[in-house]
Structures are given as C-alpha cells and as structure tokens.
C-alpha cells in the first residue's frame, strides 16, 4: 500500500503544482487528472518519474506528453460531459482516459498497433469502457462515426487536416498542433456554420502525425 499512497501523493502534487497553479481551473478537468493514475500508462521502470513535469518515452519512438500540455489540450476542448469525442493518436492511452472521464464517448485512432493494444489493456484495467479504439491513419479521421463534438490530435501536423474539420459537428472544436517537424503551434479550430475560426493557444512540440494528411 505504501507505494500506491506515494503515487497518489505525487499525482495530487502534480495537479496542484503543474496544472492548477498554471491556470487550469475547471474542477472537472482537475478531478480527472487526480483520478487517473498516470504511472500505469508507462513501463514500471519509469514510475518514479511518472508525475514529473515533462514527456516520457512509451516505446516505438513515441512519448506520453507533459502533464501540463495534456491539461491545456483537454481544457481547450471545453467538454461538459455529453460530447462524442475523436482522439487522433491513442499513444499510451493516458489522454484517452482523461477524455473518457469528461465526455460521453471517446473514439481513438492509433497508427502503431502495439501501442493501441497496450493502451486498451490499461483502460480495461481501470474499468474505462466508454472508449472505442482502432488502428489506422488518424489523419483521415473516423468518417463512419462522424460528426464529432470535439476532436483532439496528439501529434504535430504540417497543416490542419481537412478530413478532421469536415468531421466536426456544428460548434465543434478541433485542437491540433500545427507547424514544422519538432515545433508547432497549438491551434483550436471551431466550426461555426461554413466558417472555421482558428485560435493560437501557444507553442508546443509533438511527435509527427503520420498519415495521408500528416507527414
């Protein structure tokens, strides 16, 4: 029990010092980060570093994002609990789990089959079942399940993928890193009728979005 309590203390400190202290105030977002054990989404050898303020490797050249960046992107989605959400880049499944706590259903696409399989196992371990995972080219979205109230892309794209904006519901939000390989600008694109309204949420750095509308 002692190691578990230690992880819980570290997790609550992460939320207070790295997330709430930097301006994330939505109580439901903060609760989701307190509820989800980040360390379970990485190799046990990395557990001592699980709640530090930076990304960590998860294998296959991919990373689990810095907690604060996960929080910024989650907060930018503006979720109220009833949404149907599409996530591009399941990765470790940590962001998937956070989203699942904040919306009705999450559809998540991962390019690398091994990562998707591991993420599914952890989500099942945590009894998070309002998710549907698949392996494929996330840059093309999931047209069979569109439209989506919100879409999150957890990899850097050279430009906003058009299939994703086309799969937004009216009033839907797309949060996506856009820019060069290695450094991007986090964008929020909101669909208002025939118009797409773009907002700059600041600089970021993500692994490449791989696919027809990525790199």
Image: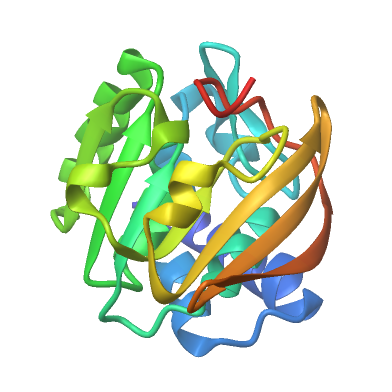
Q: What colour scheme governs how the chains and residues are painted in the rendered image of this protein?
A: rainbow
Any part of residue 190 in sight: yes
Which one is in front, 166 or 141? 166
Tell me: residue 172, above or below residue 129: below
Tell me: residue 1, above or below residue 50: below
Residue drawn where x is 48% and y is 79% of the image: 193
In-image side of 99 versus 59 (left or right): left
Tell me: residue 78, above or below residue 204: below
**Given the current orientation, which residue lies at the most extreme front position?**
194
Q: At which x and y percent is residue 126?
A: 22, 51
Residue drawn where x is 51% and y is 88% of the image: 27
Tell me: residue 41, above or below residue 9: above
Q: At which x and y percent is residue 112?
A: 39, 17
Which one is in front, 93 or 106? 106
Residue drawn where x is 70% and y is 35% of the image: 206
Any part of residue 36 in sight: no
Quadrant housing the C terminus: top right
State which quadrant residue 116 falls in: top left
State which quadrant residue 208 falls in: top right
Q: At which x and y percent is residue 207?
A: 67, 27
Residue drawn where x is 32% and y is 43% of the image: 108
Which one is in front, 45 or 144? 144
């Amino acid at each position: 029990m002692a190691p578990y309590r230690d992880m819980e203390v570290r997790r609550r400190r992460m939320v207070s010092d790295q997330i709430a202290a930097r301006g994330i105030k939505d109580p439901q977002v903060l609760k989701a980060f307190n509820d989800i054990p980040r360390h379970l989404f990485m190799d046990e050898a990395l557990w001592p570093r699980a709640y530090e303020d930076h990304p960590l490797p998860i294998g296959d050249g991919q990373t689990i994002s810095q907690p604060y960046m996960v929080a910024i992107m989650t907060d930018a989605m503006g979720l109220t609990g009833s949404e149907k959400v599409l996530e591009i880049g399941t990765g470790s499944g940590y962001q998937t789990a956070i989203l699942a706590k904040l919306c009705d259903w999450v559809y998540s696409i991962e390019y690398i089959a091994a990562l998707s399989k591991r993420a599914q196992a952890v989500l099942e371990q945590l009894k998070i079942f309002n998710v549907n995972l698949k392996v494929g080219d996330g840059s093309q979205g999931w047209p069979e399940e569109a439209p989506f109230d919100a879409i999150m892309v957890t990899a850097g794209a050279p430009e906003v993928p058009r299939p994703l904006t086309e799969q937004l519901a009216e009033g839907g939000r797309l949060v996506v890193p856009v820019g060069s390989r290695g450094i991007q600008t986090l964008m929020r694109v909101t669909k208002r009728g025939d118009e797409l309204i773009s907002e700059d949420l600041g600089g970021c750095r993500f692994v490449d979005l791989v696919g027809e509308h990525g790199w």
